Image (tube, rainbow, N blue to C red):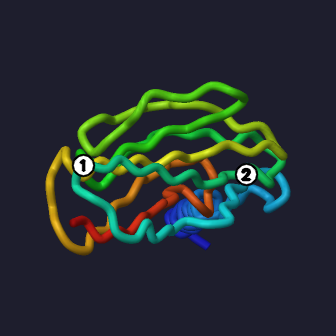
C-alpha cells in the first residue's frame, strides 16, 4: 500500500470516528429529567359580559427527578394574562407583549398553579373566543405548555 493510500485511509477513518461522535444520540434518561404533568389544559367559561373578568387555575406538577424550570410565560392576546403561583408566591401577570424570562423552578414532586385571567374589555371582541397562556419549560418532552379558555362574550 502506498503512503498516499495510507494517509487517505487514516483521514477517512478519523472522519468516520468524528462523524459518529457528533451524531451519537445523547439523551437524558427518562427517569433523570424534569417532567411536566397537567391534569387539565382547557376550560369553557361559558357566557360572560365584556365587562367581566374571569380566572381559571390549572395545575402543573413536576413528576420528574430534576427541577422543572418555568422559563417564560406569555399569552395569545393582550386581554389574557398568565401567572405562576408556587409555594405561596404569585408571579406578576404576563401577557402577549411581556416576555417574562425565568419565572421559577418547581422541585421534583411539587405542584404549581398556572392562572389564566381573561379581561374581555381590554380588547373587546364579541361572540365565541378562545384565549391561551403559554408556559415554556425545560422539560425536553413538554417544552411548550398551552392552557386555554373558551368563552362567549356578550
Tag 2 residue: 61
**Residue at the image point whose x is 43% and y is 53% from the top:** 134
Q: Are marks 1 and 2 in contact (CB under 8 Å)?
A: no
> Badge 2, how many Cα within 10 Å: few under 14, some, many 20+?
many
What residue is at 63 percent from the left and 45 percent from the top? 113
Comes first in the chain, label 1 or label 2: 1
Query: Could you tell me residue 30's position as x and y percent?
Result: 79, 62
Q: Count the marks: how many?
A: 2
Residue 153: percent from left, percent from top: 25, 65
Neighbor class of circle 1 (other Cα within 10 Å; few <14, some 14-19, many 20+) is few
Q: Is residue 2 visible from the viewing direction of this image?
A: yes
Looking at the image, can residue 6 be seen? Answer: no
In which quadrant of the rendered view does residue 15 lie?
Answer: bottom right
- Numbered disc in front, either 1 or 2: 1
Identify the image quadrant of the C terminus. Answer: bottom left
Q: Residue at x 73, y 51 (%)?
A: 61
For image coordinates 40% across by 71% down, the residue present is 46
Q: Which residue is mark 1?
A: 51
Q: Give the percent coordinates (x, y) of residue 55.
A: 46, 49
Q: CA distance from mark 1 to mark 2?
A: 33 Å
- Would you say 144 lies left or right of 67 here? left
Identify whether 104 is placed above or below 5.
Answer: above
Name the one closer to the observer, 46 or 136: 46
**Which numbered circle lies on residue 42?**
none
Question: Residue 75's spot in the image, x, y percent?
Answer: 34, 50
Element at badge 2? strand
Where on the picture, by quarter, is residue 14? bottom right
Quadrant (top left, top right, bottom left, bottom right) of the N terminus: bottom right
Q: Nearer the viewer, residue 143 or 7?
A: 143
Amino acid at each position: 500500500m502506498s503512503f498516499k493510500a495510507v494517509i487517505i485511509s487514516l483521514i477517512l477513518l478519523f472522519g468516520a470516528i468524528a462523524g459518529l461522535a457528533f451524531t451519537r444520540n445523547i439523551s437524558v434518561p427518562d427517569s433523570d429529567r424534569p417532567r411536566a404533568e397537567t391534569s387539565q389544559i382547557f376550560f369553557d367559561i361559558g357566557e360572560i359580559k365584556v365587562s367581566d373578568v374571569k380566572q381559571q387555575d390549572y395545575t402543573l406538577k413536576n413528576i420528574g427527578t430534576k427541577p422543572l424550570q418555568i422559563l417564560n410565560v406569555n399569552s395569545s392576546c393582550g386581554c389574557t394574562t398568565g401567572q405562576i403561583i408556587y409555594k405561596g408566591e404569585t408571579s406578576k401577570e404576563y401577557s402577549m407583549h411581556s416576555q417574562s424570562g425565568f419565572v421559577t423552578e418547581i422541585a421534583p414532586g411539587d405542584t404549581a398553579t398556572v392562572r389564566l385571567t381573561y379581561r374581555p374589555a381590554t380588547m373587546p371582541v364579541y361572540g365565541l373566543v378562545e384565549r391561551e397562556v403559554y408556559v415554556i419549560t425545560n422539560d425536553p418532552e413538554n417544552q411548550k405548555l398551552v392552557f386555554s379558555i373558551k368563552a362567549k362574550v356578550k
